[in-house]
Amino acid sequence: MLTLLGLDVDRLSDMKDGTPLEGNDLETLWRLLITLRRFALLDIDRWKQREPDWDRLAREPAIHRGEILEFSARVNLVTREHPPGPQAEQFDLPEYYRCELAVGEASAPATIYTLKVPKDWRLDAPLDERATVQGFFFKLAGDSPELVRPVFVAARVAWHPATLLGDLGMDLGLFDDVRAIGPLTQPAGAERTFSDRECFYQLLAAAGRTGASELADLTGNLVYKAIPLLQKPEAHFGELVAFEGLARRATLVRVEDPDIVARFAIDHYYELEVTVELEGRLRWRDEVYHSFPMVFCVRRLPKGMPIGERINETVRVPAFFFKIWTYRSERSAAKGPTARQKAPLLVGREPLWIVAEPADPRFSSTVFVGVFVLLVVGAWFVIWRLNRGDERFRRRIIVRKYAPEGDRSLNELGLEDQGPPDFTYLKGEGDGTG
């Protein structure tokens, strides 16, 4: 494979172990570094050998030259190296890095030359950073047999700081290549580059390695702020947060890339669009928002949770912040063909589905009967009051005005044959009542 990618492997055969790294060895080093740019990550993962036999490597270095070895180490020092001008231009290699390592329980010294190191690592200063190396064994180098150390060449050194993501095996240095605001970058040949794509899937794999309720337990019922993620996303890369809101969409995303399936055992995940209430008002491009959409990519959904383009489910999702994602949506389409929706994109294991408790049917029946009884009593009371009013009116007005002499009733006077009485009030004389 090295030959196919342009490296003359005879150069590796001609190297001598136990000698300083100089002369032709340096040119071979530069050629190997530029060759690694063309290597597929899947090939490196497939051909790597974990935890090498260091004693055998020291005894028979020529047999292992060119093998890809994976091991853990502590990075103690990083320096920037530059090829001479003509070679830098010839190999398109303006700079590279030399990392001094302490390997294993014995902290055996080793050196790795690499194209990239995390931006947070200080140069030319003491370090003590946890790292993983997937590198080609180059040679045993040293000025004397007592100072000989193994030398490796790699595209990058993976950084695992003392954080939850670092403990989960996530390379936090990959966030250096993430665009804080924009689409997910998956250009042609992305398997040979370190971009949003690699960081996204490593983060998704790390989230899948957490316990069933680990992220939920860590975030508890804490209230997290969404506006800082929107205002300065690069300051919150990889931060564990949790938000509660209304899930409007839940869709299954199939992963068709054999590279991702083989390296991370991820063939699908779920994408949730959740409307989250903001902790305050947010002005964004002359619009004021009280709520904002967030997109969560999770490894699984709770059993029975609805899936579709239009759902209405309350969820709380603990997840790691990834970036501000721009994508096409119904809302952005209404603003024009080039408009894009912006939303925080977070990666987690599984949402908490908050389902309202169903009402007790016995309680509902009791409430119904109670309401019915109240309505009946209320209707009876109204009728009773109306009847009392009619009786009072009869006693005060009709009986007093038309009461017959003696004990005769109104019926005995034949008023039922005279038509309705005239109740029009007229102005009277003498009494002033009218």
Image (tube, rainbow, N blue to C red):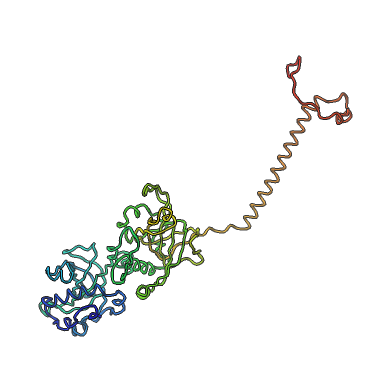
Residue 427: quarter of image:
top right
Residue 365 location (% of width, % of height): 65, 55
Q: Is any atom of residue 161 visible in this view? A: no
Query: Relative to the observer, which residue lies in front, 15 or 127?
Result: 15
Residue 412 location (% of width, % of height): 89, 29
Residue 109 location (% of width, % of height): 18, 74
Residue 270 location (% of width, % of height): 43, 66
**Left or right of 70: which side holds 320?**
right
Outermost residue on the top side: it is: 430
Residue 434: quarter of image:
top right
| Rendered view: 184 above or below 371 | below
Q: State which quarter of the image contains the N terminus.
A: bottom left
Q: Is any atom of residue 232 visible in this view? A: yes
Residue 52: quarter of image:
bottom left
| Rendered view: 320 above or below 415 | below
**Residue at horizontal 29%, vertical 75%?**
40
How many marks can you see? 0
Query: Relative to the observer, which residue lies in front, 168 or 16?
Result: 16
